[in-house]
Amino acid sequence: MEIERRLRKAIDREEFYLNYQPVFNGIDRTIKGVECLIRWQSPELGRVSPAEFIPIAEETGMIHAIGEWVMLEACRANKRWQDDGLMKIPVAVNLSTQQFNDGKIIERIENILKETGLDPKYLVVEITESMTMNKHHALMMLKNLKRLGVSIAIDDFGTGYSSLSYLSELPIDKLKVDQSFVKKMDTHGVNASIVHTIITMAENLKLEVIAEGVETEAEFGLLLRYGCNTMQGYLLGRPMEAAQIAEQLKLSK
Ligand code: G
Ligand code: G
Ligand code: MN
Ligand code: NA
């Protein structure tokens, strides 16, 4: 397969780079974090979306090398911003199931933190609900991650089958409400109710809630009213290149 063949060489040929989407404090609209999202610019195939190549990387096992590259690059960039005197913010990195199931990932992350010198409190690891279904494994991995000093976020919350009471038994810090519920909150009452319920319950469990996919002022307003102050979405900021984020961090300092 053409994509797979090209993907195998993409790290060595330095065809990957990271975009960073800002996470905002909804009250004063200042940046309080970023999520890194991988991008692939292939000379032969052009831009390929991660929605297309991440599944291939997962099926072929390439996700381990690619994921490690992402983690290293994200930590390096964040450390550089801090060394440049920019505002200190956490960078969030998405983990794939295969990475979460690989016991060696803990040591790899530990090494990356050591190598880059990034204070672990400025790294957030994003996993999805489905990765926590094996409770024994999840507890072990999450405890080990917490021991490193990094934060844990549950991504795409609401699309899986876990309940908040289940998640409350795991050492997690943040909950990211899936875009599909945030979208059309103002016109779809059901969506609004779901988001409101998640926010209220997460608050009780002392989890930070992040609303994803905020695209309109109406959604933004409702989220604030429901008590969700941390948001991500096209309304506030699209994924952008490292230099642009650095510029924003300079301005918001
Ligand atoms: O960045 P968006 O632009 O299109 O990303 C599409 C999908 O790819 C999302 O589900 C996102 O979580 C995933 N994705 C983006 N970057 C990474 C990454 O570095 N690692 C993993 N595992 N998934 C990523
Ligand atoms: O699965 P995960 O939540 O990591 O993926 C984030 C994905 O959502 C990325 O593809 C990112 O580009 C995309 N994204 C971020 N903000 C918005 C938004 O406001 N609207 C839409 N449609 N997509 C968004
Ligand atoms: Mn994510
Ligand atoms: Na998400």
Image (spheres, rainbow, N blue to C red):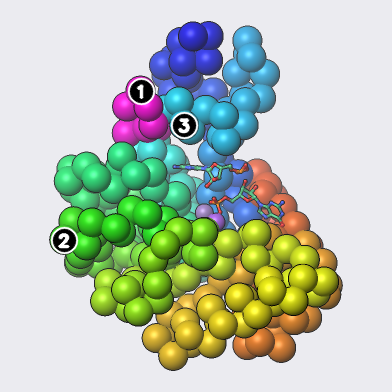
Where does label 1 land, which residue?
Answer: 60
Residue 133 in view:
yes
Marks 3 and 2: in contact by CB < 8 Å?
no
Query: Which segment is the magenta one?
Result: 58-66
- Residue 223 is situated, as x and y percent measured from the top left of the image, at 69, 79
In which quadrant of the rendered image does the C terminus lie? bottom right
Disc 3 crowd, CA 10 A, few/some/many (<14, 14-19, 20+): some
Label 2 within 8 A of ligand 1 by Cβ:
no
Which label's residue is closer to the chain start, 2 or 3? Answer: 3
Image: 155 above or below 14: below
- Residue 96 is situated, as x and y percent measured from the top left of the image, at 38, 43
For the residue marked with disc 3, what is the amino acid? Pro
Residue 136: mark in rendering: 2
Q: Nearer the viewer, residue 31 or 82?
A: 31
Residue 242: mark in rendering: none
Q: In this view, does 204 lie to the left or right of 61?
A: right
Disc 2 is placed on an element classified as helix
Q: Is residue 85 left or right of residue 226?
A: left
Q: In this view, does 214 lie to the left or right of 70?
A: right
Which label's residue is closer to the chain start, 2 or 1? Answer: 1
Disc 1 is placed on an element classified as helix
Where does label 3 land, which residue?
Answer: 55
Disc 3 is placed on an element classified as helix
- Residue 226 is situated, as x and y percent measured from the top left of the image, at 66, 87
Q: Is residue 109 left or right of residue 23?
A: left
For the residue marked with disc 1, what is the amino acid? Thr
For the residue marked with disc 2, what is the amino acid? His
- Residue 16 is situated, as x and y percent measured from the top left of the image, at 53, 29
